[in-house]
Amino acid sequence: MSKFWSPIVHALTPYVPGEQPKIQNLIKLNTNENPYGPSPKVIAALQAEAADSLRLYPDPDSSRMKAAIAEYHGLQTNQVFVGNGSDEVLAHIFQALLKHDLPLLFPDITYSFYPVYCGLYGIQYETVPLNARFEIAIDDYLRPNGGIIFPNPNAPTGIPLPLADIEGLLQANKDSVVVIDEAYVDFGTESAVALISRYPNLLVTHTYSKSRSLAGLRIGYAVGDAGLIEALIRVKDSFNSYPIDRFAEAGAVAALQDEAYFQQTRQQVIAAREQLVDDLQALGFEVLPSGANFIFARHPQYAGEQLAAGLREQAVIVRHFKKPARISDFLRITIGNESQNLALIAAVKSLLQA
Ligand SMILES: Cc1ncc(COP(=O)(O)O)c(C=O)c1O
C-alpha cells in the first residue's frame, strides 16, 4: 500500500490466475492450456517474423489477422475486433458496452474475471444462480438488465448450453448486449457465431490460448455487429493502439492456415477427455458433462481441497476453487496428453488407497 494510490486502486479485488509453477517437471493440469504444441506452420511464421521488421511498430489495425478471422467465420472485417488475449477483449467489452443504469447479469458460478472487470469499471451487476445440475437456465435471465455475459461452455463447470437456448435468450432480450464467451467452444460446443447476422446485440469472443495452443502469444477476438465492434475500437484506441504485436499477428494468421492440425489436435483432446471421464467415473467421481478442454469433478468421500493438495504432493497440479461453497469439493482438471492423464489417474488412485 502507498499513499499515492488512487481511490479506485484501494477498492480493487484483482483476479488471481492459476499458478504458473517455477518448479520443472510438474504435470500441469490447472490452467486449461493445450497439451499439444501449436501448429508447425505457426512456429515457421514466428521464425520468419524475427527479422528486421521488429524495429517497426505493428499494424495498429491488425488488418491481416482481422481479414483471416473474418474469412474463417464468413464475416466482414468490420465485424471483427482483436486484442491481447480474450481477457483484454473482454475488458474493453465491459467498459464499452456493459456499463448501464441496469445491472449486468452473469452466473453465480462462472469465469471469475467478470466481477473483477465490474470492480475496475464501476459496473453494477447481479449474479444468477446456476440450477441444481449446475446449468445456466435461460429463463432466469429474462428480466431488465444492462447486459448479459456468460461463457459457453461455462467455466469452471464445462457444461455446454445448446444454441437453441442462446437463440431463445436473444429473441427475448433485444435491448441490451449479450456476450457469449466462447473460450472453449472448439472442444465440442455449438458456436453462436452463426447467429450474428440476425442479432445486432450479440457479441461472441474467442481465444487462441486453448484450441490453437497459443496462450503464450496472447491473442483473442470478438465478432459481432459492426456498431458494437466500432465501440471496442474506440476504447482500444483510447488505451493502446498496438495490442497485437508482430509475432502475435503472424502466428494468428498462420494458425488459421493449418485447419488440418487444428482439427486433429482438438479431436485428440476431445477423445482424451472422454477417456479421462470414464477413468474418473470408474474411481467413483461425479463428473459434470463437459464441452471444454477440462472437466469439473468431485468425489463423494474426499474434500476437494484435500485431493488437490494430495495431487500436488505427487507433482500433479489441478485447479481448486474454495468459493463458493457449492463447488468447493470440485476439482477443475485440464485435459492433458495421454501420459499426463495416465499420471493423473495413477496419482488419484494412490490417494484413494491411502
Ligand atoms: C471463460 C474464459 N474466458 C476468457 C479467458 C481468457 O483467455 P485469454 O485471455 O487467454 O484469451 C479464459 C482463460 O482461461 C476463460 O477461462
Image: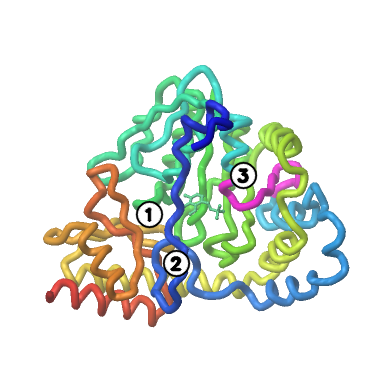
Q: Which residues are magenta?
A: 75-87
How far from the left and from the top, in percent, is residue 166?
Answer: 46, 40
- Nearer to us of marks 3 and 1 is 3
Helix or strand or loop: what does disc 1 sit on? Answer: loop
Residue pictured at 44% horizontal, 49% vertical: 16
- Nearer to us of marks 1 and 2 is 2
Whether the magenta-drawn stretch holds residue 342 is answered as: no
CB at mark 3 closer than 8 A to ligand 1?
Answer: yes
Label 2, on which residue?
21
Q: Which mark is residue 89?
A: 3
Helix or strand or loop: what does disc 2 sit on? Answer: loop
Whether the magenta-drawn stretch holds residue 84 is answered as: yes
Label 1, on which residue?
158
Q: Amino acid at mark 3?
A: Val
Per the model, the C-alpha gap separating discs 3 and 2 is: 26 Å
Residue pictured at 70% horizontal, 34% vertical: 235
Q: Which numbered disc, 3 or 1, marks the residue that appears first in the sequence? A: 3
